[in-house]
Amino acid sequence: MNKDSNKYLKGNIRIFGCFILGAVIMAALIFLFDSIFGFSDEEENDEDLKAYQDWIDEPANQMVLLKPFESPAEIDWIDVLNEAAMRDFIGHPFSDSDDDMISDFLALSGKSEEKTYKVRVITDDEIAEYIKEKTGSSFSIDKDEIKENEDYWFYSDKFDVWYCYCWYIDSYDYECYGIPEYEFECLDVAEDGDEITLHVRSYTYTDIHKAQTEIKMKKSGDGYQILSNVIQWEGGAIGSYPVNIPKLGDDVTVYIYDDYRLTDSSRQPTGEYSYSATVCGDDADYLDFSVDESNDLGSIIGIKEIGTGDYDMDRSTDLIVIVEFEKATYPFLYGSSCMCDKYMSEYAYKEVTDISCESVLDYLTGGHSDTGFTDYKEAFRIIARNENGASGGSLTDSDYSNDYKFKLVYFNDDDIPELVFDHSGYWLSVYEFIDGYVHCIGSYGYGAFGNHGYDYYERCGVIRNDDADHAGEDYYISYYKYNEEKHTIEEAMYHHGINVDSDEYGEEGYYIYEDGAEKPTEVTEKEYNEALSKLLENAGDGALKSLHGELSYEEIMEELK
């Protein structure tokens, strides 16, 4: 290489080096400028989320979001339209109407004229346009089905319009226990072309905790069409417990939340929060963690344990939740449903030491939660003890001890009696013992005044109840039959009688529940009597016996020795 070539190469290297240095300096300046004046990806996402928050904060955009749904076809449009009408988002005020339309509405609705200020006038075209705008789907009100909502929707053939009677007008700031009902918090958003997935949380859906929902939308003009709004129960949960409870839908999950707002005596938020739980199976149910104020347990500080077991010995799995309060540990028992068995929970709290799912189960079942009993007397002694305790701790010391009674009856056609626990004038329960376990085959309220209680046909599996209303002007005679397969007593038939010449109480009639139907079938008096004879064919001499309790707690325990 000659000297000129070497000089040329060195010059190029210097130029290339200057170019690289300049590029580095330029990149640094761009980075510095962007750091000072530009926006990060996170900030851009925040700006996008704020835009959606501004959109969902508009009341007009919330009407379709007040209840969850998986598709627009599931939306309760009658309810949505009523919410929209009361805020003047659809239709026009009735005050714009002439006298003929006012007279038309009064004739259709039976409302008084001073109520007309609560009415919105809406056309089918307006309804179709509103729903198309909000969801992109079509819907029209069925003029026949609307009768189910005839208290606030009326169709006028004369003017070809709907009259929507609104309970509230221009009312939006609903509160439940001081909590804004319609308030949504946007959590995150993902955009894929015109398709948007938005996650929000709100007290709108439960009033208990801020449930999280996933909203699917698509862009439409200057707004959005909402395609679905599905609750995600795991969202916001601080814990989840899978359990198997067949009566709630087999494999279910209990979700725990810590954003339950506490309120004062005037139902206003205190600014403090507590715990709540939702059981998600076939349906979503909320667990009640409230206790009697006399216990003075303080606030809930956590969920100690969640378990299952058969605490009431009916061969059905129950849910048990052990909750840690500031001053004590408390067991919450959920038997036949997600409704707390408050009296039995309170009894277990007072009687069980070192409270846990295992210790509560062991006490309430006498150690037989898994094995069952070999003798009905031992099983009924445990039931009587628990009912005694749950009804006041000690019936013999209670001012109402004479109102709580027990009795053994031969209700079914076998040699093992059934146990009756009776709170006279209020309710009674009947327990049977079968295959080592106890089943509550029926619990009945006495009703009021004309309902004197219940009678039974011995060894026939049939209960009769006479119930009179309105000083005996109308009455019901009902028969209940034992269902051996389900271990329950179900209504079989009834007669509605009327003792006055009046149509005020409907029509006299005879009714039979056929093949386990939920609704009865009306039959003739002859058909009814034939069915009754068949029902009572094993009733022996047909003598009725009282199902009322007769023995005190001490007396029944003595008889069960």
Image (cartoon, rainbow, N blue to C red):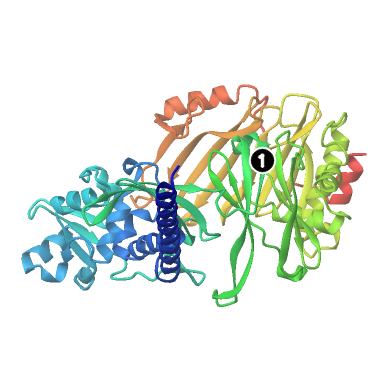
Examine the rendered structure and indicate whether residue 515 appears above or below residue 50: above
Which of the pair 209/1 is nearer the observer? 1
Examine the rendered structure and indicate whether residue 333 appears above or below residue 438: below
Residue type highlighted by circle 1: Pro
Residue 333 x %, y %:
72, 49
Residue farthest to the front? 2
The mark tally for this picture is 1
Whether residue 72 is visible, yes or no, is yes
Residue 314 x %, y %:
73, 36
Which of the pair 522/483 is nearer the observer? 483
Q: Which image quadrant: the C terminus?
A: top right
Judge left or right: residue 68 versus residue 135. right
Judging by the rendered image, the residue that carries numbered circle 1 is 242
Which of the pair 84/155 is nearer the observer? 84
Q: Residue at x 24, y 43 (%)?
A: 137
Judge left or right: residue 397 versus residue 7. right
> Which quarter of the picture shows residue 65?
bottom left
Residue 240 x %, y %:
65, 47
Q: Which image quadrant: the N terminus?
A: top left
Judge left or right: residue 315 versus residue 506. right
Disc 1 secondary structure class: strand
> Which quarter of the picture shows residue 289?
bottom right
Dot 1, crowdedness within 10 Å: few (<14), some or many (≥20)? some
Whether residue 391 is visible, yes or no, is no
Examine the rendered structure and indicate whether residue 465 appears above or below residue 120: above
Residue 95 x %, y %:
14, 71
